[in-house]
Image (spheres, coloured by chain):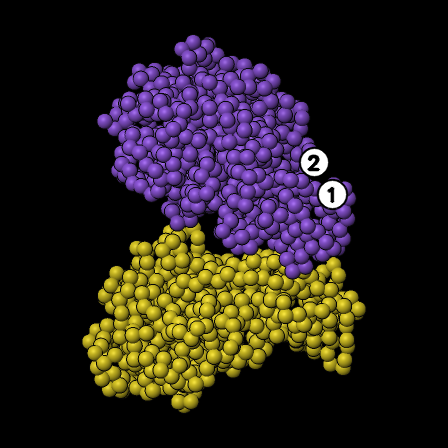
Chain colours: A purple, B yellow
């Protein structure tokens, strides 16, 4: 990378490409003053801004030293720039306290594509749209033209839109072969709607903007994860089979485990999210947010865990960083003063939908340690080997006081990372890193290091593009570009509202995709009784046994991908262009993915399909189920239930595994 | 009014109230640069703005002369201020061409209420919301929480919102006893959300801001209408009875007239909107937009008109300023070059929903004259005494070239006034002003003078607050504050979509309100066959005969109100505070109105009601139907169908009329 600077102008180049430019005609920075209005309802935010001032900054002075260039922008901002071959950092110093809005323009060209901004569920390529960076509920429906979205909006302000995500991150990767990260957890909005520039809006002057380049996307991912950290490897036991999501107490849960095993479905673990007890709300079955095992529902759970461990099966639970105000732990935390409060010192309780919780103040080191201890003692301590580390998106912003003294507008996006770190340290300090897996939906810059596994959040139980099966593919690809290369999703989706219910077909299509991800896990959903469950249908169990078996047969290959993610930051699910950089079409595909270097998966994400259109980059591909060979291009293949289009590279060193799968389970 | 000015500060006072203020800390003017994005679909607009710059202006110089003060705001703007006892005008001179956004702050206080911004259908008091000023379709449903709105949005981008209106105007009346008008037809947004100021956004530097004050609201209305002009009186024949909206050709239309007369419903006129022919679209029955009588559907119409005229009944038609591209007049206009074109000179056709029309270029004096001649010849010339002068809101803004050379962004809001003027001159030059009535839904600043009667647009056929019966009360009050004091509405509403259909109850509740307006007219709606029609139901015709008779009995009183509107600009339908200025509650009432000085009407705007809560200011009130006396306050009265709560002042000089009505039609 290279900078050019004179009295009035500044430019940054990546190779021949101008990435940044400032001149009188094309200012790089605008600053201003805004007054935000933030309205939260159960994790759904309505945020508006009244910008009273916005103006471009003039470059008024340039000071060059040996290793830095200092750009002075009037009396408002000093930008200290360091640049070497692959990395440019711009540190900002704010000189005028009044400024609380910052817009930064990045030079763009029309053909350029951009990816990232965290885990994006609707659009992989960000060009043509703007993306608010604010962790929140992802929305139910996420598409204003659907009935479910409209009803969710009207009844719960919860419909959401294309950009809503549990895991936003102020970072993007450009096809000009660089990534750019803004070091700020303030509200931001990355706008990719303009042909000649991207405009990054941040509701503070950020500490730093970091731009790093590389010759290849693989190398870029290595650099991204060198900076943000890398996810650890998954424990070996996850490859033993399915994680079954069941609940309802000892009898029901372990009864369903027995039934599942009886039908020859390999099981790696049983995930009982209601290990802590349950409560019923109008939304559906919810949990008792007091993170100890429920002695009535799961009597002698520690003993029970030992029993199933002996059979090679793990037990997984559920934890989140809130405590319900009628629980024991809340009482303890309140006595210790570990919850965030209102400005007047009184309790701050968050409405989670017919129950109210205290916010454990993770900025208070003592509270943080206390919550780690809760996980260590009540979860890890009784032999639980994994859990859903839910939530993290709900830090309210009105009238809430935190130990750190920082504004909740700054801590809000930071919260998921604090929550990930809390889990990480609890596991690491217990000596269990690598043996335990917790999965999170919330994230932010830094999640990479602290989050053992993402899960894609609470999809609707349908085939909709913006909130169904398809959306988790986009989510995996975009999170992967951020260096979060381990993710998975609830097989069959989660949210069933307004008569939208899960079908057998949806469950099976989702499961047949999940076998080509690092982790296979079912979920009964928010309304188990009215939605399709695999254990109610003998045919489904037979089919599922086959799919899980394929997953376990793939394990030697999948493990190498998970290791590569841990070692180099190359995601397990990759966009096609990551290995086919010269293939222009590859950059627009968001519903196919490479499962590592050697497999291409094109999941069927629509209902009632028997064949499927697939795009293959130029290579020697073998169809997993038929053995038919392809050399690239647009093809149509048979895609009956259970045979989602999957291909492997003919010369793969794992070809024998793929052939073995075909022999056992291929189309005869 | 009084101004105070020194080197750095400027203030304008109305009495003790500071209305304008500029200081370094509280700048009065912000300017900036924006790029709008305007997307029109069948009269529904999606407008967004990308404001790249916005900054406050400093007062840098003050030049005082005998009768003016010139305020220089840096190198951007000079404001030339004239001020006398009741009027302050500020003329702006723009010094920097780059500026295309202008924000003007008006000092406010928390208790202040504001009214106007044209005809507002959802909120009479504007405080707490912003109001874009842009003429458009008003929306179907106008409330994002209703099913009809959602479906309209999804299928036609047509759901609308609280601020959508056919008749916006950049003018408001403050309870600080002044009106403020911005002399600009550019897109504007009046923002009343702040406690201490109103912010008026205009997408150009306006020519002038005009502030005029008065001691009373009546006097203020006189001044408003002295400036904008006043609506002429209605012809006497309108008071003869109902205008029946029927269609379908000679046999059906005149057959229904006979049936109506046969049931003793007094009829003033028959309104056949399809006098020009019809076309059927998926929306419903539409018209043949070629403004001559249809020789197959209405053979010998001129003769037929003479026949009914002889019986004291008028004939009304329909015209709008577009011409369908398969019609005769379009052909003629195109040959003459009277249509707006694309930039490259090719035809510009507007999509009106499965048919396409040319835009008669009303800025071309020859085209304007030609269209006047069309009205004179084909409408007035065959004896038509009234018509719906529909539309005016659809001037597109993309790639359209006008004779005036002005931007369509400037002409768009001007179009309804040009259209009103075209009708006005056609009538006036034909010597028929006072004999003819045309009614319009579109409007703008200046409509007051040129529009003989407003109608409230295309309500949904329901009781919804934002698009049903109630909304036309709010519309009448707000239009009245602008000096458009003659309005009425389609009895029973118009738009029936998505299984929303008119009921008998709705029709009758609407009709019983309409008798207390200056004009009673029915409409079959967009889907006549599936909606309730009065002529299908004997009971309704009996009830309607009574309501129309009351309307005719009220005529001596109503006429004085219409005259007062023509002479002084006092609207026929008035908010309660107009005559009860010291009554604080009166300022918040938007669903009751004074029908002139002596009547108070509280229409039942919900279904299935048998009694109704009414607020009466302190006065001597007599209930029209029972004769019971009230002295003000909150009361509940019986409100059976046909007996909408109506009161008159005991000492009214028209008391004998009201008593006569009670004797004939009151509760026995």
Residue A74, horizontal then vertical, whole percent: 75, 54
Residue that sits furthest to the right in the current view: B7
Please name the residue shown 32% across and 60% down the image.
Answer: B496
Q: Residue under label 2, please give it.
A: A405
Q: Residue A68 carries which label?
A: 1
Q: Is mark 2 on a helix, strand or loop?
A: loop
| Front residue (pair B645, B273) | B273
Residue A81, horizontal then vertical, whole percent: 70, 44
| Front residue (pair B348, B452) | B348
Tell me if residue A22 comes above or below residue B238 in the rendering: above
Q: Is residue B251 left or right of residue A134?
A: left
Please name the residue shown 32% across and 80% down the image.
Answer: B331
Q: In this view, does A518 lie to the left or right of A499?
A: right
Image quadrant assignment for residue B225 = bottom right
Question: Could you tell me which quadrant the C terminus of chain A lies in?
Answer: top left
Residue A296, horizontal then vertical, whole percent: 45, 16
Q: Is residue B568 visible?
A: yes
Q: Is residue A526 visible?
A: no
């Amino acid at each position: 990378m290279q900078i050019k600077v004179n009295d009035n102008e500044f430019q940054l180049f990546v190779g021949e490409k101008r990435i940044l430019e400032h001149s009188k005609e094309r200012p790089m920075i605008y600053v201003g003053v805004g007054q935000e209005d933030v309205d939260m309802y159960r994790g759904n935010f309505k945020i508006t801004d009244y910008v009273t001032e916005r103006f471009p900054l003039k470059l008024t002075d340039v000071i060059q030293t040996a290793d830095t260039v200092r750009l002075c922008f009037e009396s408002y901002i000093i930008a200290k720039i360091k640049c070497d071959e692959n990395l440019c950092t711009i540190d900002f110093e704010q000189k005028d306290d009044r400024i609380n809005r910052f817009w930064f323009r990045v030079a763009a060209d029309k053909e350029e594509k951009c990816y990232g901004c965290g885990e994006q569920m609707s659009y992989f390529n960000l060009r043509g749209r703007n993306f608010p960076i604010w962790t929140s509920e992802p929305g139910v429906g996420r598409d204003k033209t659907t009935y479910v979205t409209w009803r969710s909006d009207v009844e719960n302000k919860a419909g959401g839109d294309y950009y809503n995500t549990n895991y936003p991150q102020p970072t993007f990767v450009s096809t000009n072969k660089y990534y750019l990260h803004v070091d700020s957890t303030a509200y931001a909005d990355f706008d990719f709607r303009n042909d000649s520039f991207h405009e990054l809006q941040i509701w503070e002057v950020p500490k730093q903007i970091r731009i790093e380049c590389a010759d290849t996307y693989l190398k870029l991912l290595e650099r991204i994860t060198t900076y943000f950290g890398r996810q650890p490897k998954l424990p070996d036991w996850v490859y033993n089979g399915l994680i079954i999501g069941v609940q309802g107490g000892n009898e029901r849960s372990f009864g369903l485990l027995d039934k599942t095993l009886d039908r020859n479905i390999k099981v790696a673990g049983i995930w009982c999210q209601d290990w802590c007890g349950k409560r019923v709300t109008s939304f559906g079955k919810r949990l008792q947010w007091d993170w100890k095992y429920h002695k009535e529902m799961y009597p002698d759970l520690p003993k029970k865990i030992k029993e199933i461990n002996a059979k090679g099966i793990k037990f997984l639970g559920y934890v989140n960083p809130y405590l319900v105000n009628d629980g024991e732990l809340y009482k303890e935390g309140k006595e210790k003063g570990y919850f965030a409060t209102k400005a007047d010192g009184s309790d701050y309780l968050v409405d989670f939908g017919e129950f109210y919780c205290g916010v454990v103040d993770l900025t208070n080191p003592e509270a943080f340690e206390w919550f780690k201890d809760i996980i260590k003692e009540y979860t890890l301590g009784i032999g639980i080997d994994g859990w859903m580390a839910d939530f993290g998106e709900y830090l309210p912003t009105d009238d809430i006081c935190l130990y750190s003294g920082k504004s909740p507008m700054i801590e809000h996006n930071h919260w998921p990372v604090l929550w990930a770190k809390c889990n990480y340290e609890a596991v690491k300090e217990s000596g269990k890193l690598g043996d335990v897996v917790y999965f999170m939906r919330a994230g932010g810059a830094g999640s990479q290091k602290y989050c053992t596994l993402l899960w894609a959040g609470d999809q609707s139980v349908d085939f909709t593009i913006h909130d169904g099966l398809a959306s988790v593919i986009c989510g995996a690809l975009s999170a992967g570009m951020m260096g979060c290369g381990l993710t998975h999703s609830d097989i069959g989706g989660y949210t069933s509202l307004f008569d939208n219910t899960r079908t057998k077909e949806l469950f099976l299509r989702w499961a047949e995709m999940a076998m080509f991800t690092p982790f296979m896990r079912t979920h009964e959903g928010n309304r188990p009784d009215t939605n399709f469950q695999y254990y109610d249908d003998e045919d489904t169990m037979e089919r599922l046994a086959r799919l899980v078996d394929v997953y376990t047969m793939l394990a030697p290959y999948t493990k190498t991908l998970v290791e590569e993610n841990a070692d180099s930051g190359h995601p397990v699910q990759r966009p096609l262009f990551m290995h086919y950089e010269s293939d222009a079409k590859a950059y627009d595909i968001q519903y196919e993915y490479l499962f590592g270097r050697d497999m291409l998966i094109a999941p069927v994400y629509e209902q009632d399909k028997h064949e499927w259109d697939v795009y293959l980059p130029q290579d020697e591909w073998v169809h997993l189920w038929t053995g038919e060979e392809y050399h690239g291009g647009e093809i149509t293949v048979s895609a009956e239930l259970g045979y989602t289009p999957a291909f492997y590279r003919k010369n793969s060193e794992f070809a024998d595994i793929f052939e073995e799968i075909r022999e056992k389970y291929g189309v005869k």
